[in-house]
């Protein structure tokens, strides 16, 4: 055996994976799945019977949680699929900059300035109007697979 030490160049982050495996046959409607490297919410699942040569297949129809595109995938039900870790976090809205970025207050009192305003017109106008009226707004940020986007808005009353 050699006595020299091995040094590994690690480029990974803190080990938290962006996805986890789950058997295709156990993924249900309203769950999440990765289709074509995009995190999707499952809107339809249909399972075909086992054919002459084996596997039952699951046909997934999913909607991308960030850009609302419809994606489809067919996977043998016994195989594993990637399921994204989807987190929702509430932040208080502090400011909206001219270039379309928002300034948010985190729970520990720091600010988060790297998020853009949402592309959804309805949500966008609600945020801008509420902010212009001086309301205290809390935005819900959904994050999955290294992407983040504002997905909901709550009004917690007027600013004092």
Image: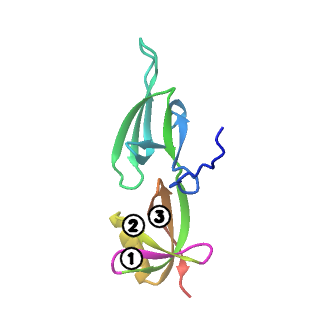
Quadrant in the rendering for residue 124: bottom left
Which residue is pictured at 38% across the width and 70% down the height?
Answer: 117
Within 10 Å of disc 2 (Cα), the crowding (few <14, some 14-19, many 20+) is some
Image quarter of the C terminus: bottom right
Q: Position of residue 93 (x, y in %)?
A: 49, 76
Q: Of the two numbered discs 1 and 2 on the same chain, state the one appearing first in sequence.
A: 2
Residue ranking furthest to the bottom: 160
In the rendered structure, are the residues bearing label 2 and label 3 in contact, judged by CB atoms less than 8 Å apart? yes
Secondary element at tag 2: helix
Identify which residue, 115 or 1, lies in the foreground: 1
Q: In the image, is residue 63 part of the stretch drawn in magenta?
A: no
Residue 128, numbered label: 1
Q: Position of residue 137 (x, y in %)?
A: 50, 75
Secondary element at tag 1: helix
In the picture shown, does residue 37 fall above or below 112? above
Within 10 Å of disc 3 (Cα), the crowding (few <14, some 14-19, many 20+) is some
In the picture shown, does residue 95 fall above or below 67? below
**Magenta residues, start to end:** 98-109
Residue ranking furthest to the top: 52
Q: Which residue is mark 3?
A: 152
Residue 123, numbered label: 2
């Amino acid at each position: 055996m050699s006595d020299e030490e091995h040094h590994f160049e690690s480029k990974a982050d803190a080990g938290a994976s962006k996805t986890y495996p789950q058997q295709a046959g156990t993924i249900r409607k309203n769950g999440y799945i990765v289709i074509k490297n995009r995190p999707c919410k499952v809107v339809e699942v249909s399972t075909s019977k086992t054919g002459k040569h084996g596997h039952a297949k699951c046909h997934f129809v999913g909607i991308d949680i960030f850009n609302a595109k419809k994606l489809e995938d067919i996977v043998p039900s016994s195989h594993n699929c990637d399921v994204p870790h989807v987190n929702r976090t509430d932040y208080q809205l502090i400011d909206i900059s001219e270039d379309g970025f928002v300034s948010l207050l985190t729970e520990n009192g720091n600010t988060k300035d790297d998020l853009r305003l949402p592309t959804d017109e309805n949500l966008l106008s609600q945020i801008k109007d509420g902010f212009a009226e001086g309301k205290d707004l809390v935005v819900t940020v959904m994050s999955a697979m290294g992407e983040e986007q504002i997905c909901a808005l709550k009004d917690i009353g007027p600013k004092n």
